[in-house]
């Protein structure tokens, strides 16, 4: 198979900046939805926030194949095995399609029980149910998009994913304006209109990614690829992907439980948390971009056997991430009132959100250690340690301390924020110690040997 991937290895900046723009635009989809729905009612925003937690949880289930495939692909690219990388791409797309179909059916038919589990106030169900049903029914397309996007990024085509997300944003904003506010003679559909707009933009993104897959990687997925799957390749993907899914899953399950604590505080506090998290995500994007860029770079270095260079590269990424994230959260905290004022005029929600963003000056640097180093450990093949620490830290510290401070002592959202902040820093420092200890080297050697050995098929290909 011919490949048009550039021969010169890309730098971290070249990989990371399109990822930053892409992730910014991707999060902007949710932010724009929240901003526009805020013109309906704060209760509608609270309902959207809870429903989106379910959607995000489903996306994490799909993302583990994308994460695992991305790492394995970078190992093959680093080892110079382009045909091996192409086989991983085909397997990842096929597997994720099946997982996506299962996820779509589950969310579509279980929307109401899921929302009740999240302790959504009954009066907000009228907003959340149609949104979750429509978004859930089309999640299988997002599963395919995740696998294709991860494959393109692993080959160095980070700008392509950025452009697709940009187009998706424009379509989503346009659709929201038309269906939410009834422009151009369209009916005013409220939150349901937002869901329809999101679904349409998701379809357009899927079509664009399939075209790019064919043009960039010269790869066509055949119908038989969905039914005849290579178990050795699936095992390699799952070796990285399942622990990654476990780590992400436990984080979001923790967040769902903590969100249920905020629900007990009332719709006003739930809206406050939703608005604050939307603004806070603007800062998290910097760490996410550096983390994903570092993962791609470290995966290639491991595939090429350059372990010492990989070690130094991660420490450099952490220093860069700390500087950027700290600077960004200080700017956001200074402009907190103006940023939150884009969503609501409620003085109580504004005051509480400003306070949460200001104490996040301590929160965000701790997140850098986790995002950057966990991605790096994953790229070496050391994928189990992060999930083991996450289960302990989040469920033995994050959740119980959030309950104790937020509900038992009555500190409310500030107490919940302090609990999440403490857990983030503990876990982050443990990740930093793991990288400095070099215990990941055994996994890196194994990953390098496996990618190099795959220059010749390990088993007969079907």
Image (cartoon, rainbow, N blue to C red):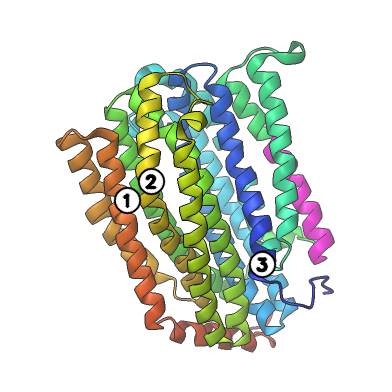
The stretch of residues the image draws in magenta is 201-219
Q: Is residue 202 above or below residue 428?
A: above
Q: Please state the horizontal and vertical placement of residue 73, each as a whole percent of the image.
A: 64, 72
Q: Residue at x 36, y 63 (%)?
A: 428
- Mark 2 element type: helix
Reading the image, the residue beneath label 1 is 421
Residue 154's disc is: 3
Q: Nearer the viewer, residue 390 or 242?
A: 390
**Mark closer to the chain start, 1 or 3:** 3
Marks 2 & 3, CB-CB < 8 Å contact: no
* Number of residues whose C-alpha sits closer than 10 Å to that of mark 1, classed few (under 14), some (14–19) or many (20 or more): many
Q: Is residue 238 visible?
A: no
Reading the image, the residue beneath label 2 is 360
Q: Please state the horizontal and vertical placement of residue 27, each as a whole percent of the image.
A: 57, 42
**Mark closer to the chain start, 2 or 1:** 2
Circle nearer the viewer, 2 or 1 = 2
Q: Which quadrant would residue 397 be assigned to in this image?
A: bottom left
């Amino acid at each position: 198979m011919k490949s048009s991937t550039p021969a010169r290895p890309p730098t971290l900046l070249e990989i990371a900046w399109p990822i930053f723009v892409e992730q910014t635009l991707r999060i902007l989809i949710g932010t724009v939805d929240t901003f526009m729905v805020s013109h309906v009612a704060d209760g509608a925003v609270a309902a959207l926030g809870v429903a989106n937690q379910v959607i995000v949880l489903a996306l994490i289930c799909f993302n583990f194949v994308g994460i695992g495939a991305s790492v394995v692909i970078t190992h093959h690219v680093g080892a110079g095995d382009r045909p091996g990388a192409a086989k991983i791409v085909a397997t990842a797309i096929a597997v994720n399609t099946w997982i996506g179909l299962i996820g779509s059916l589950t969310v579509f038919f279980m929307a109401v029980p899921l929302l009740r589990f999240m302790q959504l106030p009954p009066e907000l169900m009228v907003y959340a149910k149609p949104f979750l049903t429509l978004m859930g029914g089309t999640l299988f397309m997002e599963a395919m998009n995740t696998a294709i996007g991860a494959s393109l990024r692993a080959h160095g085509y980070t700008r392509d994913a950025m452009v697709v997300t940009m187009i998706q944003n424009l379509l989503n904003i346009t659709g929201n304006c038309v269906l939410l506010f009834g422009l151009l003679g369209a009916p005013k559909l409220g939150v349901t209109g937002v869901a329809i707009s999101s679904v349409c933009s998701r379809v357009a993104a899927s079509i664009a990614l399939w075209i790019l897959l064919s043009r960039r990687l010269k790869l066509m997925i055949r119908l038989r690829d969905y039914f005849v799957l290579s178990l050795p390749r699936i095992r390699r993907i799952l070796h990285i992907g399942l622990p990654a899914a476990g780590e992400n899953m436990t984080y979001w399950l923790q967040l769902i439980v903590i969100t249920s604590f905020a629900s007990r505080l009332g719709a006003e506090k739930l809206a406050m948390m939703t608005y604050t998290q939307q603004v806070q995500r603007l800062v998290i994007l910097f760490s996410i971009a550096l983390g994903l860029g570092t993962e791609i770079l470290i995966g290639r270095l491991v595939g090429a056997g350059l372990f010492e260079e990989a070690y130094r590269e991660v420490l450099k990424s952490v220093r860069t991430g700390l500087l950027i994230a700290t600077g960004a959260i200080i700017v956001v905290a200074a402009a907190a009132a103006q940023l939150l004022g884009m969503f609501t005029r409620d003085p109580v929600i504004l005051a509480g959100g400003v306070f949460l963003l200001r104490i996040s000056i301590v929160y965000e640097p701790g997140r850098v250690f986790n995002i950057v180093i966990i991605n790096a450990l994953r790229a070496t093949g050391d994928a189990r340690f992060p999930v083991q620490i996450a289960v302990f830290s989040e469920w033995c510290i994050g959740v119980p301390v959030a309950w104790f401070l937020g509900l038992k002592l009555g500190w409310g959202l500030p107490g919940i924020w302090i609990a999440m902040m403490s857990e983030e820093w503990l876990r982050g420092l443990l990740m930093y110690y793991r990288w400095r200890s070099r215990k990941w080297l055994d996994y890196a050697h194994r990953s390098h040997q496996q990618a190099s050995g795959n220059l010749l098929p390990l088993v007969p290909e079907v």
